[in-house]
Structure formats: structure tokens, C-alpha cells
Image (cartoon, rainbow, N blue to C red):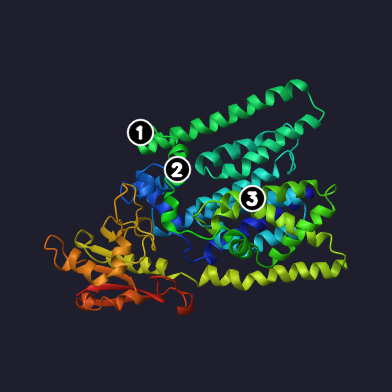
Amino acid sequence: MHLSKEFGLLLLLILWRLISVIVVRTAHVPDEYWQSLEVAHRLAFGYGYLTWEWTTMIRSYMYPFLIAILYRILAKLSLDYILLLTMLPRVFQAILVAYADYRFYQWTKNKWMLISLCLNPFWYYCATRTLINSVETACTIIALSIHPILGRAISRLSLKYMWIVGFLCMIRPTAAIMWLPLCYIHIYCLRYIRCDALEKKLLPGRCVLICFTCAIISILVDCYCYGTFVITPWKFFQTNVLKNVGNTYGIKHWLWYIYIALPVLLGLHFFPFLISFYSIYKQSFFLAKEGIMLGIICWTLLIYSSLSHKEFRFILPLLPLLICTSFTSLKYLNINANVRKRIIAMFMCSNIIIGLFISMIHQRGTLTIMADLRNEITRTNTSLTDTLILTPCHSTPLYSHLHVNISIRFLTCEPNLSNTENYIDEADQFFANATVWLRDNYINNVKVMLPTYVIAFDKIASEISEFLGTYKLIAKEFYTYRSLTVGNYGENILLYKRV
């Protein structure tokens, strides 16, 4: 009976995450396509575009390689339809996340924590996206659930979690920020645990062997895909840390993770999380695990805060620890149990409206406009089709959502890797003076023909109306409300065809 309940819970969680594959129909960040699906499409079908991260070899191919295998299977079965190419990777992502949810419940044994994880709007928004951060978060939850100190490992000497950690650190080097202290805590605590002395001595060697095996497998995959010997974590360190290239994509205040990112990630749970500092301090003997979790959270946030480039998704792997610690304060509130349940329910329900808005409405147009473009070009002679995308760089997916080998040009925003003086990337050049850019690159350039299709946000379309004079508007898709638009984005995204 117990097994049937456990299996039933797993199936329910899989269903919940599969529903999110259908519900989440918006775009979040470029990496969910350009660092996964686009790379996998090029691996599997031989055409596509690779961003500068792949030409400088700072990214691991492990995740795109797995998606490419799926793509090749679909191609062999003549099932490489665009719906399957875009949805199946997310379906497998949903199954992975559902298993992580299940492991979270096995770890915490708290249904309210599980519900809180499942209804967290930002995690629901990101969980089934083909983002390496989402994979990292799901794998982190699974690894935490079997961690010998924080989780429910069968033995204090168990190193099963290290296999997950080893691959995570190779694929996503920043995962080491969170996991190095957790691995140290495991080894340090062994001195106070009664167990076989020989096994204790062998433990560091086993750790090294696991890490070495993970590293070798990852390096072999990268060498095969890149076609040359490369250690991507080292390349990543050289580029993002030593050269500080990440600053190209935005610099935020030192405390941004504290006063912006955590409230967005936790919603109303942010307040119980703040109270948990006091709860854990007062009950430090009984809440030793929670104290370790809080220490890991503070350490990770401290390191990430010292880096200039910051994003919400970077701290997603902290979510399971944040939920566990925030519930600590709710658990020890000196109030009636029914009142406590109502407070928890209020916290969770407050997330639903936000979750639905960002998952179904906000920033959806960049996906639907690519569907419009695909429907249009499949009815024409693709060899004569040329498309120009005049949006902030990487706003739309590309060949992974078209699956047609046509000529496409879009505005790039590569960092100044060659240290050129007064460097301005192509996207900034265009938005600084769109008319001049179009004149230099198209109107006065006899070597280049005008594109058949143009995609642009309504904000910029009004500025280049003269250039669009020979074009007809054939599709208009809602992107987001005008009050929420930022930078060079607009309320609607438009597709034009040359007449």
C-alpha cells in the first residue's frame, strides 16, 4: 500500500509538470534556446548558429548533446516535426523535475513544503524550460535528498550524490560554489561518526575517483563535439572570471540578490525566510541541519553578490534550501496549528496569479512570431528566402523553431573579446541610429539584397518606417503590456514581407 501511494505521488507530480509544458508558453532568457536547442539542432542536423560562447569553447556540450541524440532519433524515424523538436526536450525536462519534486518530498517528508515547491511561481516558470539552470536545480534537489548529512542517505559514507555533483560542476562550473562546502561538511562530520576506519580512509580516494570519472566523461563529450581537445570549465574560468566578460550583459548592485532576487524567487515566503535567522539561532541545537542550510545559502549569495553580472536564475539551485529554512520559522511560530496552515496556504495561493501571468502572457510574442514565420516560409521557395531580425539580440529562437535551412541575419551582441578600442556591438550600433545602420548595411550596399522578411518590435518599426515602405505587415503578435516593456522591446512584435 505504501509503495502504491509513493508511485501515485510520482505520477501526480509528473502530470503536474507535464501540464506546465503546455501552460508555459512564454520566453524567459535567450539561453533557454541559444545554449541548448540551437546547439543541439546544429549537432543533429548540421545547420544552425552558434553564439560566441561556443566558438570560444566556454560551454559544455553535455546537455545539448543529450538533446541532439533525441533529435537524431526523431530524424531517423522521420518524426522531426517542429512540434516534437520544441516540445519533447521540455517533456523530458518535466519528467526530471517531477522526479526531483518526488525526491524533495522523500527528503523533507512535509507535504506543505512539496506544495510550496510545486507552486513557486518562478520555479514553475523556469522548471520545464530547456535551461541549464533548470537542469542544475533539479539535479541539486536530487543530490541534496541523498546527501549523507542534510538528506536521507542510507549510509553516512554514501557518495552517490557525488556523481551528480561531479557532472554538475563540469557542466556548470559555478555549481562548485554551493557544493564545495557541502562536500567538505560531509567529510568533516565523518570524524564524529562511528564507522569502519578503513572505509573512512578510503573515502577521499573514492571522492577523487568519482570526480575524475565525471571529468573524463565530460571532457570526452566536449572534445568530440568541438572537434579538438578542450577543458570547458577552465575556458569558462578564463573568460568569465579572469576577463570578466559577464559584465558586458549587465552590472547590478552588490545587494541585488538580497533586495530584488530573493523576494522575486520566494514571494511572500521571503518574510518567513528572514525570520528563520532568529528561529535557527534560538533553536540551534535542534535545528543543526537548518543552520547548515542557512550557512550554505549565505555563503553562496555572498560569492554570487561579489560577481558584477547577476540574474535571477543563477540562484535557482538555492530554492530547496530556501524553502526548508523558511518553513523553519513557520514551524516554530507560537500560534494555533490551523492558523499556521492558513498562513502557509495564503503564501502559496498568492503565487498562482503571478505564475500564470508570467507563464502564459508576459513575453510570449517572440515565440509565436517564429511560428508565423515558419508557416509563411514553408509556403514559399526557401532558397530565395532571406530574413532580417531587428530585435535586441537573441530575443527570438532561430533554427530550432524553424527547422528550415534559410538565410537569417539578426543583430549580434558579442563581447569585446579582441579588446578593440571604443567597441560597440552590432545591436547597440543599430539601436543608436537604426536609419544609418540600415542605409549602410542594406540600402547603399549593392552587394546585399533586401531581405524577404523583417521582424521587429513596434517600437523600432515606427523609427524605420521609410525602410519598411516596400514591406507589408503580415503578422502582429502581442509581447507584453506597454507598462512592462524595457529598453528596445515593445508591446507587439511584427512580421513584414517584401512586396
Q: Work out which residue is located at the far front of the displayed protein and give it.
A: 421
Residue 14 image point, x, y percent: 62, 56
- Tell me the kind of residue under disc 1: Thr
Q: Nearer the viewer, residue 430 or 47?
A: 430
Horizontal arrangement in the rendering, residue 152 relative to residue 174 (left or right):
right
Q: Where residue 148 sits: x, y (%)?
A: 73, 38
Query: For residue 228, which numbered disc appears in the image?
Result: 1
Asked whether the beta carbons under mark 2 and mark 3 sit within 8 Å of each other, the answer is: no
Q: Is residue 196 above or below residue 479?
A: above
**Residue nearest the viewer, comparing 351 with 3:** 351
In front: label 1 or label 2? 2
Q: Of the residues shown, which amino acid type is indicated by label 2? A: Leu
Mark 3 or mark 1: which is in front? 1
Q: In the image, 199: left or right of 339?
A: left
Secondary structure at badge 2 equals: helix
Q: Secondary structure at mark 1?
A: loop
Task: Tell me the number on the disc at residue 100.
Answer: 3
Residue 350 x/y as whole percent: 67, 72
Distance, label 3 to label 1, CA atoms, is 35 Å
Q: CA distance from mark 1 to mark 2?
A: 23 Å
Q: Does residue 47 appear to the left or right of 103 in the view shown? A: left
What residue did someone put label 2 on?
Answer: 242
